[in-house]
Image (tube, rainbow, N blue to C red):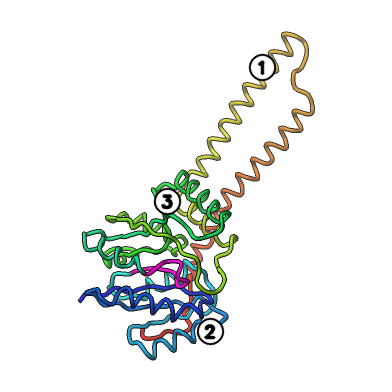
Amino acid sequence: METFKIILPCHNEEENINVIHKKVCEETKNLDYLFEFTFVDDGSTDDTWKKIEELSKNFKHINGISLSRNFGHQSAIQAGIELSNDDSLIIMDADLQDNPKYIREFIKEWEKGYQVVLAKRIDRDENFFRKIIFSIFFNIQKKLTDIDIPKDVGHFSLIDKEVIKEMKRFPENFTYFNGLRTYLGFKTAYVDVIKEKRLYGNATMTYRKLFSLGLNGIFSFSSKPINFIALLGFTISIGSLLVSAYSLFHKFRYGTTILGWTFGLSSIYFLSGIQLLSLSIIGQYIGRIFVDIKRRPSYIISKTLNT
């Protein structure tokens, strides 16, 4: 019988562990497949790991991975994927914002032959400001990345075992899982979902972490920022030549200058800002090269259960 392994990255989710397990079991109990759970504790400071241990004592289908510290959401997903067997995976968060009721629809699409099934968010049960932030990010990402990463799609997804095999071949760390999943390019379907409100606890994905994740998504899958610098430099150079030529013409033709010291000072400030912006963009790429060549593991496992 086909087995699906459900990967659930967790960080301070002690109140949600039992609830998410119960809800997933309720939604999948009548399906003709086996389901296993792999909870990945990403350095929680509460009793998340204790709850996972208690659950594993009562259910054989519970696996657990405890990371030595908080390595981040992407690293937790990577740990769950790399320690999985040759099974198809369902990836979802443990905070119940990803509603388990959609798993049935995922599997229906998978049965049709789709190897990747993505949850496409048609609405979010979140505050207005957070909705705006996500909308801006997805629009920027779509314009800048070299591959067509789907808009309004997160980590909640079903991935066929053949896709997982290919994903495991990648030597790089999963700094942006959504981009890597798209890069593989397998046959993909979408299921419309509503992003629910977190049931218990506080969101651990801060705006700073979201911003960092967004930068990873752009700089890991796009060369357009570098091309932008080249285009900007070329445009400024041509503009400077034209202005200089006109200024000289005006000086020799009419005997007066059209540009004073205030223009020169403003130009210096403007060009200094452009230089700093260009250096910061280049620095983003160099920083990622620096991190990658060290070949440090993106996570370290301290304990496992049944894996």
Q: Which residues are magenta?
A: 90-100
In reply to whether residue 92 is colored magenta, the answer given is: yes
Q: Residues within 10 Å of mark 2 (few under 14, many from 20)?
A: few
Q: Residues within 10 Å of mark 3 (few under 14, many from 20)?
A: some
> What's the residue type where badge 2 is placed?
Asp
> What is the number of callouts on the image?
3
Q: Residue placed at 52% from the left, 48% from the top?
A: 136
Q: Secondary structure at mark 2?
A: loop
Please give the name of the residue rendered at 61% of the width and 47% of the height, measured from the top-left corner: 279
Residue 61's spot in the image, x, y percent?
33, 83
Please name whichever residue, 51 or 159, is drawn nearer the observer in this view of the structure: 51
Q: Is residue 269 magenta?
A: no
Q: Is residue 83 left or right of residue 228?
A: left
Mark-to-mark CA distance, 1 and 3: 46 Å
- Neighbourhood count class around disc 1 (C-alpha, 10 Å): few under 14, some 14–19, many 20 upward: few
Instruction: Name the residue type under label 1.
Output: Tyr
Find numbered disc 1 in the image and state the secondary structure of the residue it sits on.
helix
Q: Earlier in the sequence, mark 2 or mark 3?
A: 2
On-image quarter of the C terminus: bottom left
Q: Which residue is mark 2?
A: 47
Of callouts 1 and 3, the N-terminal one: 3
Looking at the image, residue 274 lies above or below residue 60: above
Q: Amino acid at mark 3?
A: Lys
Quarter of image, res 38: bottom left
Residue 244: give x, y in percent of width and height.
67, 21
Determine whether, in the image, residue 172 is placed left or right of residue 251: left
Identify the residue position indicated by label 1 in the image: 246
What is the distance, in whole Å, between disc 2 and disc 1 at their CAs? Answer: 72 Å
Q: Where is residue 235, by image quadrant?
A: top right
Give the main secondary structure, helix, strand or loop, of the magenta stretch: loop
Mark with earlier residue (2, 1): 2
